[in-house]
Amino acid sequence: MKDKATIKDVAQHAGVSTATVSRVLSNSGPVSAELRGRVEQAIQALGYRPSRMARSFRAQRSKFIGLIISDVENPFYTSLVRAVEDVAYAHDYSLLLCNSDEDPDKERAYIQFMADERVAGVIGSPASEAETSFAALLDAGIPVVSVDRRSTCTPVDTVLLDHVTAARDLARHLIAHGHQRIGAILPNTSITSGRERLAGFLQAMEEVGLTPDPALIHESKGIEAFGAQATHALLDLPDRPTAIFTGNNLITLGALKAIQERRLRIPDDIAVAGLDEMPWMSLLAPGITVAAQPIHEMGRLAMHMLLERIAGDRQPLREVKLAPRLVIRSSVATPAFV
């Protein structure tokens, strides 16, 4: 037996769901006498003691919102957290912030924690579109809104960027400046943003009859180190690209570092354009052309949708796509040979 039993331990011991244990503990919702007896026996056998937070949640309506993000070091999520917190605070809710590190197992543990502690609602950015399951939350009657990415495993309300349009607009901008051999470094296609950004890039190429060279397309973990590694690989090609398309802000940062290490000039030696706007991108010389996401609008909208569900809204599930904004700076120019 563990040093301190959890509600999950009680559920496993009794052979019931954590939602059933929660109903027994809070004396709310229908539970048969037989199941109640099994739960109570499990509680006694394991010596389970509810946490102070859990007791507070059961004594009154929870005023905590769970927020599970994929990478706390990514400035995109920093801005998203701020936007969610602004709305939550204005409605007397506090945030419980968890960082999944793009790890489905770690994410699964946090989802179960939120379900066990009976938070009022959860906003999550799925680590995997096909693997992330919010079932433990939904079974406990806790509403969920997915932000930036979808969860096809357990459909919920979703707020995200129109990733296809963002990538297509950015690729079209490069093509309009005469670039045909474009290296693309994108996040994993197991998540919404990676798959749809690749689709948008390919659409733009196909529109003008270009067939992308597979050697020019790299799929990464979406972090700085992989952005640099993929950029070096592209620059090592015998026929290297004239432009690099980066799939998120951290990939862009890695690409810029690799280009600097090669002592190449932007845009004279190679053009760069990427997804996601960051404050420092306008301060570089040259500034970086980007497809910017309305991050604050995304976070605020997700929180408002969650508040509606908490209040009892039962309308059909919604998916809201927000439009990107193309910010043109000086990192893209016509190749010298065109």
Image (cartoon, helix red, strand yellow):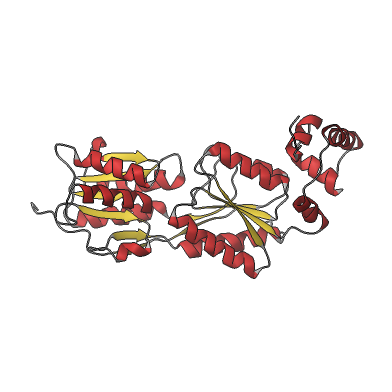
In percent of the image, x 24 and y 36: which residue is there? 215
The answer to which image quadrant residue 132 occupies is: top right
Does 241 sit left or right of 70 as displayed? left
Q: Nearer the viewer, residue 51 or 94?
A: 51
Q: Is residue 69 above or below residue 108?
A: below
Q: Image height check: is 239 above or below 337?
A: above
Q: Position of residue 295 (x, y in %)?
A: 46, 61
The answer to whether 132 appears left or right of 192 in the picture is: right
Q: Horizontal placement of 179 versus 64: left or right?
A: left
User: Which residue is nearer to you in this view: 93 or 45?
Assistant: 45
Residue sitting at x 32%, y 62%: 281
Residue, far left: 337
Image coordinates for residue 60, horizontal then vertical, percent: 80, 59
Q: Identify the residue at image location x=50%, y=65%.
A: 297
Location of residue 22 by image quarter: top right
Q: Is residue 28 visible?
A: no
Image coords of residue 266 (percent x, y): 19, 56
Instruction: Give the percent coordinates (x, y) of residue 238.
Output: 14, 36
Q: Residue furthest bottom?
A: 90
Q: Nearer the viewer, residue 79 or 172?
A: 79
Q: Is residue 271 visible?
A: yes
